[in-house]
Every structure is written in C-alpha cells, then in structure tokens.
Amino acid sequence: MNIFLIGPMGAGKSTIGRLLSQELHLEFIDSDREIEARAGANIPWIFDVEGEAGFREREQNIIHELCERDNIVMATGGGAVLREANRKALQAHGVVVYLHTTVEQQLERTARDKNRPLLQTENPGEILQQLMRQRDPLYRQTCDITLHTDRRHPKAVVSEIVRQLTRRGLLN
C-alpha cells in the first residue's frame, strides 16, 4: 500500500508523513528532499538556475519513479498536482490524502522559512491566496481523503488518516 500526501506548503505533509510512516511501518519519502538529494542542490537554487519549469520536470520524474515503489508514505511538494501526469500517477498507485490548511495557518507555519522560493516576495499572503485558488481544485480532484490540519496536532491528523483508511478497508 502507498499513501501520498498532497496539499499546500505548510499543511504539515512532511511532519505528518513521517509520523504516519512510523505508525504504519512504511518507508517515508519526501519528494522535495529526494529532488534535492539527487540534484545536489536545494530547491531555491534549482528554481534560480532552471526556473519553475525545470524544477517541475525534475519533480515529475521523481514522482513517477517513487510511485512505482510499494509500501511508502510520500509527502509531495505543494505544486506536484499542477501536472496532470503527476495527479494520474498518484491516483493510480496509492491512496491520496489532501492535507488542507488555511492561508493564515500557512503564513504562520512558513513565516521564517527561506527555502520556499515562491514566498520570497513582499506579500507572501497574496501569493499563498493565488496558489490556493489555483491548486485547491486540483487537490480536491486528485484526493481520496481530505483532512483539515489547522490547529491540529500532527498525531491527531495521523490518527484520523489511520481511522479513514481502516474504515475504507485499506488497513486491518
């Protein structure tokens, strides 16, 4: 079984993914960290040198490769759903969980993070609003389960994911 976490930056995908993988005894993979490890550079550098299009190409290649594995929990980058090929790969190879959060919560969680190229602007809140308008329909179209993470402890979200998977007969 594979579980893929999608949602905006700051939704808690990496934190919740790590905890969920421990709970279910599955391997955890963060697609953004995998991209960085293989590129030998961080995401802001990739954006600077290759632009967003270059980054999205790398992301698509990694997601397709990782979707071929079994028994993983994968946290995707916030923009992974922008490409239809990624959405189809995720849907075809596992259960997709949308970790939804508000823009206000995203701002709180990402305020001091310099590793997010799209937010290095005068008004990150405006950028997050634009991204949410563009991406929320794609997250909803792609997912099997939607969970809200605002003001929730990561362990509570993990418990809810496990409950939902059990209820759907995907876990014993």
Image: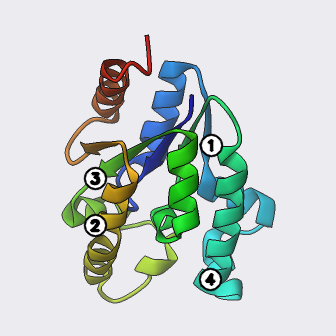
Q: Are marks 2 and 1 in contact (CB under 8 Å)?
A: no
Q: Earlier in the sequence, mark 3 or mark 1?
A: 1
Q: Are marks 4 and 3 in contact (CB under 8 Å)?
A: no
> What kind of residue is marked 4?
Ala
Q: CA distance from mark 3 to mark 1?
A: 20 Å
> What kind of residue is marked 2?
Leu
Q: Earlier in the sequence, mark 1 or mark 4?
A: 1
Write the residue at 64% across / 65% down: 59
Q: Position of residue 164 (x, y in %)?
A: 31, 27
* Front residue (pair 76, 164): 164
> What kind of residue is marked 3?
His
Q: Position of residue 81 (x, y in %)?
A: 47, 64
- Does 90 sit left or right of 51 as displayed? left
Q: Position of residue 89 (x, y in %)?
A: 58, 53
Outermost residue toward the bottom? 122
Q: Which residue is mark 3?
A: 100
Asked which secondary structure carries label 1, the reply is strand
Q: Which residue is mark 1?
A: 29
Q: Residues within 10 Å of mark 2 (few under 14, many from 20)?
A: some
Asked which secondary structure carries label 3, the reply is strand
Asked which secondary structure carries label 2, the reply is helix
Q: Earlier in the sequence, mark 4 or mark 3?
A: 4
* Front residue (pair 21, 4): 4
Numbered disc in front, either 1 or 4: 4
Specify the label residue 107 is tagged with. 2
Q: Which residue is mark 4?
A: 53
- Residue 34 in view: yes
Write the residue at 53% across / 38% down: 94
Q: Are marks 2 and 4 in contact (CB under 8 Å)?
A: no
Q: Earlier in the sequence, mark 2 or mark 4?
A: 4
Write the residue at 28% across / 45% down: 146
